[in-house]
Amino acid sequence: MKELPVDEKLAKKLRILADAAKYDASCASSGAPKRKADPDGLGSTTGAGICHAYTPDGRCVSLLKILLTNYCLFDCAYCVNRRSSNVKRAKFSVDEVVTLTIEFYKRNYIEGLFLSSGIIRSPDYTMEQMLLVVKKLRRDHGFRGYVHLKSIPEASPWLIEEAGLWADRLSINLELPTEASLGRLAPEKDGASIEGAMAQMHERILESKQERRHFSPAGQSTQMIVGADDTTDADVLRTSAKLYGHYDMRRVYYSAFSPIPDSSSVLPLKPPPLMRENRLYQADWLLRYYGFDVDEIASGGEKGMLDLEVDPKLAWALKNRHLFPVDVNVAEREMLLRVPGLGARAVDKIVVARKHTTLRLEDVARLTSGLKRARPFLITADHHPQGRLDRLDLRETLVEKPEQLSLFA
Amino acid sequence: MTLHRITLRDGADLDGFRKAVRRLVHEELAPQHVVFDVEAAPDLFGGEAAGEASPISLPRSLSEMIGRVVCHRDPERYALLYQLVWRVLNGERELLDIATDPLVHRLELMARAVRRDLHKMHAFVRFRRIRDAELERFAAWFEPEHFILEAAAPFFVDRFRSLDWTILTPIGSAHWDRDKLTYGPPARREDAPAEDEFEDSWRGYYESVFNPARVNPVAMRAEMPKKYWRNMPEAVAIPGLIQTASQRVERMIEQEATMPAKRTPERALEAMWDQEPKTLEELNAIIAKAGPLVPGATQAVFGEGPAHADIAFVGEQPGDQEDLQGRPFVGPAGKLLTRALTEAGIDRSHTYLTNAVKHFKFEQRGHRRIHSKPTTGEVKHYRPWLMKELELVRPKLVVALGATALLALTGKATPITRSRGRAKFGAWEGYVTVHPSYLLRLPDEETKREAYAAFLADLRRIHDLALADPDTGELPLAAE
């Protein structure tokens, strides 16, 4: 096949349609079964995912994340591509997306494609166009790299059935954590059809795993925007817990609402709440890997909002000092996971190592970079926090000087 | 006791180290009596004849750690590894479990550094197309921190199997010719192409995905240290992006919300939701375009019969004959069904006949294609189409022939024996009976006769049920 040169027009479209896609926080290329290229095909997946570059916002560039088009009939207030916005518009042809994906992939710029789209003509038409891209990649180019497809919940259910056959991951962004916000800020969207589509994908992902067939093997994910409405952190986390529980989401992404060019008058124009986003991710981890429930996490903060000064595990521990100190040499794994500054990996290593040796403070220091936070809550062979846990200024001694997270924070 | 000197090849000499360890262990030489040296072209074992000592068994986690750590640049790596091996073989078999042990910890950090370097090489190598090459040939220049070229190369083979590529580094080069992977001497940056026609658009992409409102160069550098930047074409954009970020955000915040320049596209908005197929022909075109879920079928077999038929029969999936002819219920089971329908007083041509699954799935045995049952997931894959189909046909009564049809109509797996008779499928009045192929499979004539009679009785009841009151739409037996 003769390769098409990237003409200026295509390069311009790429800028518009990449810019239009960047507010989606999902970047993962993980979770796909390990695959290798056929002798005349292209692409592989390693299971773990690879970040091929990082932009100066610290975010990873793994997949070619673009919209098929940013023309859109929907009018979601938070979205840069809503129909009432005056941003520049563009539309790729199916072949243009295929060419960019293949040529970028051959140069090792990307792990694959993350394709989303504004809604044009109808949800079905839009979804069909997206499917054409993936089928062409898989069938005509033997492409075995990663493909993440945004499903359109308003499209007919058979299109979601088909999407899962070609994609490694499917996602539908909930965007707003409550039905009320959805109604106010995204008039064309409907919480019931979003959840219906999530349930359909969940059921099919489970069945195909049992039947050893390919249907979105890397599962599904979703995203919620934080700071565009007045939902509390506790309610955001409650929604997450439900999404993890009901639909077995691989990830819930939190995206701090960020000022967009040509924004809508109904939304706040202020710097994105990056620290809040960071705390929500930490809380999300506590939900999934540390055995915390939403109420426990929320109890660490005030009025349903997480403490911005300390991480949510430390916030919880400071309010539950009677449960500490914990002895690293004897405590249950579940309790070690609740010690501030100890990650799940460090805890697992502690549990294995202590079968053979008695741990001292310097041993724990080799396993975690969070010893400063852990110290007041830990007992080791040579260390006991004594009265430190009861000190009124304990919190102040543990608050990290705020890192410069953003020039504008 | 004199020091025993081991000289290994420059780079990651896993093989040399393995041989040395076997010999040293065999001769019971403790680590304090051994010195490891590295040379470009070593004399094996300082001139001693390199006899092969027999292999020693090491825990797998230790072998894995050795494989990683030999790639490290630290000149002490072999000595540290040998200390570890010695301790493991002399009473500390589970030493690697003790992640807090200073030696284990140090080696684990080295292994981690190598893993990270490998990961970064897989991520940050940038191929450039070799100009004027007739075949598609690519080359890249990369500077790894550790001796990882040979450990990193197989990843690129798996990924770019159909391409011809070379990776050039200061510690050697790797070349793949679409058949064999070979290693060559160290290279220089100038040996790789200086540009590529896709780099401008890649840089444009990189610039566009950056969100200036989230600028955080510290986080970027943690994952993509500066040392990699000079070999990444997108990295030249970094200083500019950081410098202009604050202005760009201030402009966005200062700028007042604008009025939409375009009018609301009323007609397009109205038309947007009008996307569902309106006729069976439109629906069937969609099914045909999607292709079979399991490869092999000749064609999709659609439902057949008048729209608004009183009764819709739903079977399992097309068989061999149906697949070839493109019509439902034309094989042996279909013939039996037609006969039974006639006996029950139902005119087949007035009913709607379809299948839960629209494509034939089979196992090839010699020349024969043996029907294979669709899985639950497959039945559900086709389910949305079946639901739409029934919505378009609007029968008074929907008949499930067999368990697969029942699964498709209810979404749940239920045995036929428990649900045979009248049923509700969502809003549909329904009836559950066996699939005619079940009658064909019964072993002896007696049971066959009995089963056929029961099937016929079901069909007669179905016939009665479908005679709904034309005014109220109620079924005659609804009061039962």
Image (cartoon, helix red, strand yellow):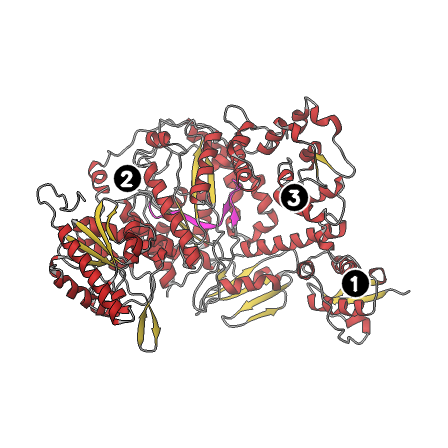
Q: CA distance from mark 1 to mark 3?
A: 36 Å
Of marks 2 and 3, the one in the foreground? 3
Q: CA distance from mark 1 to mark 2?
A: 70 Å
The residue to which callout 1 is attached is B36
Left or right relative to B2: residue B479: left
Decide whether residue A66 is among the magenta residues.
Answer: yes
Q: Secondary structure at mark 3?
A: helix
Q: Three-letter amino acid code at disc 3?
A: Val
Mark linked to residue A73: 2
Which chain is disc 1 placed on? B
Percent coordinates x, y for residue B73 in the rendering: 70, 57
Badge 1 marks a residue whose secondary structure is: strand
With respect to residue A321, does B214 lie above or below? below
Seen from the viewer's position, the closer of residues A248 and B276 is A248
**In the picture, residue B219 is in which quadrant?**
top right
Chain designation of label 3:
A
Q: Is residue B354 above or below residue B100?
A: below
Question: Residue A239 occupies which quadrant of the picture?
Answer: top left
Regarding mark 2 in the picture, which secondary structure is present there?
loop
Q: Are marks 1 and 3 in contact (CB under 8 Å)?
A: no
Q: For the view shown, which residue lies furthest in the top direction?
A: A392
Question: Which portion, as a residue range, is magenta?
Answer: A53-69
Q: Residues within 10 Å of mark 3 (few under 14, many from 20)?
A: many
